[in-house]
Amino acid sequence: MQITDDIEIDDWELTEQFVRSGGPGGQNVNKVATAVELRFEAARSPALTDAMKARLRRIAGQKWTKEGALVLQVSETRSQSRNREIARERLAEMIRRALVAPKTRRKTRVTPSQKRKRLDEKKRRSTVKALRRGDETSG
């Protein structure tokens, strides 16, 4: 399965299991296993770096198992093949999101001129309000 130009996931890393969907749908629900459970062995994947795996784990949340696999369950449509496509698309999107390293936050400092401006403005507001307080007694 091709994720990007550089990253490709081998077939041994993916396991698909088809199960019966829950919810309404009449007799079709009871007869046909249309829901798909896609399991990606992310922790053992050679296609992803450790940093990517860590980001993927954070993105996956509860879908990440203790064994280091990512499990996606899809039962949106009545078509088994469409549910399979949706599950693969979601997995690919999650991996693409994990590829992007977040920007590192750089600490910034308030410049002395900015501090001075802020304090000057506070003093000005303070005097304006003090003058207003003086006006209230002569009302």
Image: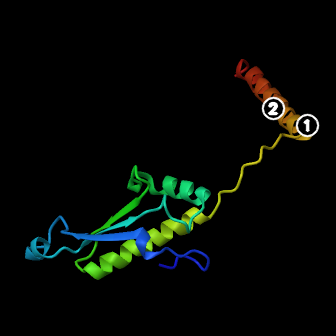
Residue 18 position in % (x across, y down): 24, 71
Residue at image mark 2: 122
In the image, is residue 20 above or below residue 128? below
> In which quadrant of the rendered view does residue 54 lie?
bottom right
Residue drawn at point x = 44 percent, y = 54 percent: 68
User: Residue at image x 22%, y 75%?
Assistant: 34
Q: SS of the residue at dot 2?
A: helix
Left or right of 47? Residue 90 is left
- Amino acid under label 2? Lys
Is 60 left, or right, of 125 in this rendering? left
- Residue beneath the point at 37% across and 75% down: 86
Q: Residue at x 59, y 57 (%)?
A: 50
Q: Is residue 86 above or below residue 40?
A: below
Question: Mark 2 and mark 1: span between their CA atoms?
Answer: 15 Å
Q: Disc 1 marks which residue?
A: 112
Q: Earlier in the sequence, mark 2 or mark 1?
A: 1
Please state, as top left, top right, bottom left or bottom right, where the C terminus lies in the image. Answer: top right
